[in-house]
Amino acid sequence: LLLPLQKSLAFYSPLSNFIISHQSPIANRNNMSSSSSSTTARSASLSALDQDLESWASNSGYGSIDKSIPAGSSGWASFRKVTVTDPPTNADGKPVAFFVKSSGRSCDEMFYGEALGLEAMYACSQGSEDSLRIPKVYHYGDYSSGKGSMLIMEYLNLAGRSDDRALGKAMARMHLAEATEEAGNGDKAFGFPVDNTIGGTPQPNPWTKPSSGTSEWIEFFATHRIGHQLNLAGDSYCSNLWQNDIRPRLHLLFEDLQGEGKEVKPSLLHGDLWSGNIGSADGSPSIFDPAVYWGHHEAEWGMSWCAGFGPQFWDGYRSLIPEDEGFLDRKPLYDAYHQLNHYNLFGG
């Protein structure tokens, strides 16, 4: 069904070597030298950050700031590792250090969606020893001066990818977590409380109706994933192929997932799961830099062509979530979303 679209997108689709070897223009700007005026602006922003961190620590009952160590930056934010004199403890009883992201832009622009995504992943990764290690969010908001914002989360000792079977099982735990108020989805719908981004591309996440199933998921993915990316690409051939030949028959890919006990249910998705967003923390699997939303769990694997999931990973995942009938037929659909996104980000 999707073969014509896949073929027409073939020259657009970057493979893992392309992704790993190419930095975005935004990231490349970090290598540019800064003018004295931008240095002054950063110093002023840092002063506002330090003041607000002191106030936050005191108001939260964590004492005062002990150390605040720069930990790098991106094209849009700066990072710090912060310790306090009276820290909280994590689930293992160990004192928590904090990872702080800061920006000269507002929290709504920069951190609100990320914070909600991390909170949802944290909520959906609790209650089992073999769950994902997700940092707890402690605070997010604008500076008191109104000239910048910050996101404060638990600092994790991140390391490289470790046990792939444990990763697969932990991903299944998150996908199986119930949609609840605590996780931000009491209506059990597809979507997310806010729009966010997939890479640098806007990702719309309007909620579907409460207690949504397969038909609502098909409409959501067709409109707000494939259709959205095709609109951004501006390729009339692919758009016409999608609208006239593929979308009207999309339901055929989901015939095995309709009816009582078979409907697609909302699962919390990382949304951008490739090898660069996978690691470990204190021996447990961890994933980061998400593009979170509630969707069909199979949509998580749309970036698997550059994630390196081998037999051990799938053995762990399938031990909890068996493969549904038609999975391999639907996979090109979910791949196409990310292939289109990379075309929109990087070009042909």
Image (spheres, helix red, strand yellow):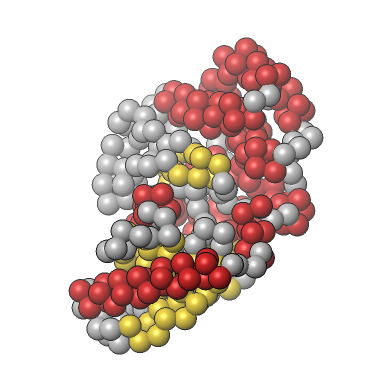
Where the N terminus falls, by quadrant?
top right
Where the C terminus falls, by quadrant?
top right
Q: In percent of the image, x 36 and y 33: which residue is there?
A: 207
Q: Residue furthest top?
A: 244
293 to 274, vertically: above or below = above
Q: Position of residue 233 (x, y in %)?
A: 64, 30
Residue 66 can be seen, yes or no: yes
Q: Position of residue 126 (x, y in %)?
A: 36, 61
269 to 136, vertically: above or below = above
Q: Position of residue 215 (x, y in %)?
A: 44, 23
- As rendered, which of 302 and 43 lies closer to the eye? 43
- As rendered, which of 56 and 96 lies closer to the eye? 56
The part of the image, by quadrant, that contains residue 36 is: bottom right
Number of callouts:
0
Q: In percent of the image, x 49 and y 62: which residue is there?
A: 77
231 to 186, vertically: above or below = above
Q: In percent of the image, x 66 and y 64: which residue is there?
A: 32
Residue 322 can be seen, yes or no: no
Q: Residue furthest right?
A: 11
Q: Position of residue 143 (x, y in %)?
A: 31, 63
The part of the image, by quadrant, that contains residue 214 is: top left
